[in-house]
């Protein structure tokens, strides 16, 4: 076995440990205020909507997490809960990432709020 091959064998577990610790400790976003309301909306939307539920989600080996929220527009309003009539100011976009076994990222998509002027 060459020196380069040995180096690669040692690097693979190290990189896996870094990926797992990033997934467990650093990926999920911590927010307050309107962004928190939007995060709750996104989490509920992902659970309800069949478009986002893959076979992994149905058998319970995957989980979705909101990893970033960005405010796109400051004007207008967005309705995040029609039943309880909860509105937030502006338009938001959230990035959601799917994880297999809560450790390995496998899917990523974005969800926008229902913005009106």
Image: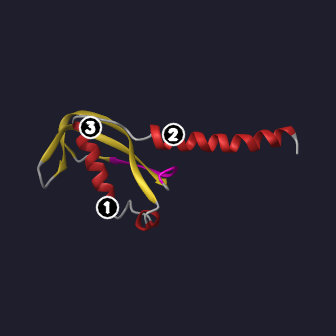
Read off the residue under disc 3. Answer: 35
Percent x, y for residue 37?
Answer: 23, 42
For the residues carrying marks 2 and 1, which lies nearer the camera in this image?
Answer: 2
On screen, residue 43 above or below 59: above
- Residue 47 among magenta residues: no
Quadrant of image for the N terminus: top right
Q: Outermost residue, right direction?
A: 1
Residue at x 26%, y 37% (from the top left corner):
35
Disc marking residue 22: 2
- Seen from the viewer's position, the closer of residues 27 and 113 is 27
Spatial CA span between label 3 and label 2: 22 Å
Element type at mark 2: helix
Where does label 1 land, which residue? 49
Give neighbour class at mark 2: few <14, some 14-19, many 20+ (Cα, 10 Å). some
Q: CA distance from mark 2 to mark 1?
A: 27 Å
Looking at the rendered image, the quarter that the C terminus falls into is top left
Q: Residue 39: give x, y in percent of width and height.
A: 29, 44
The answer to which of marks 3 and 2 sits earlier in the sequence is: 2
- Mark 1 and mark 3 lie on one chain; the one further toward the N terminus is 3
Where does the magenta region start and end? 102-111
Residue 73, numbered circle: none
On the image, the x and y values in percent for residue 92 come to 28, 40
Q: Residues within 10 Å of mark 1 (few under 14, many from 20)?
A: few
């Amino acid at each position: 076995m060459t020196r380069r091959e040995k180096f690669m064998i040692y690097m693979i577990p190290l990189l896996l440990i870094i990926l797992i610790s990033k997934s467990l400790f650093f990926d999920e976003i911590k927010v307050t205020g309107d962004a928190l309301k939007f995060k709750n909306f996104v989490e509920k939307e992902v659970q309800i909507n069949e478009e986002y539920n893959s076979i992994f989600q149905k058998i319970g080996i995957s989980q979705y997490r909101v990893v970033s929220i960005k405010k796109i527009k400051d004007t207008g309003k967005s309705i995040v809960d029609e039943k309880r009539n909860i509105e937030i100011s502006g338009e938001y976009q959230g990035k959601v990432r799917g994880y297999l076994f809560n450790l390995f990222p496998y899917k990523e998509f974005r969800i926008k709020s229902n913005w009106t002027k």
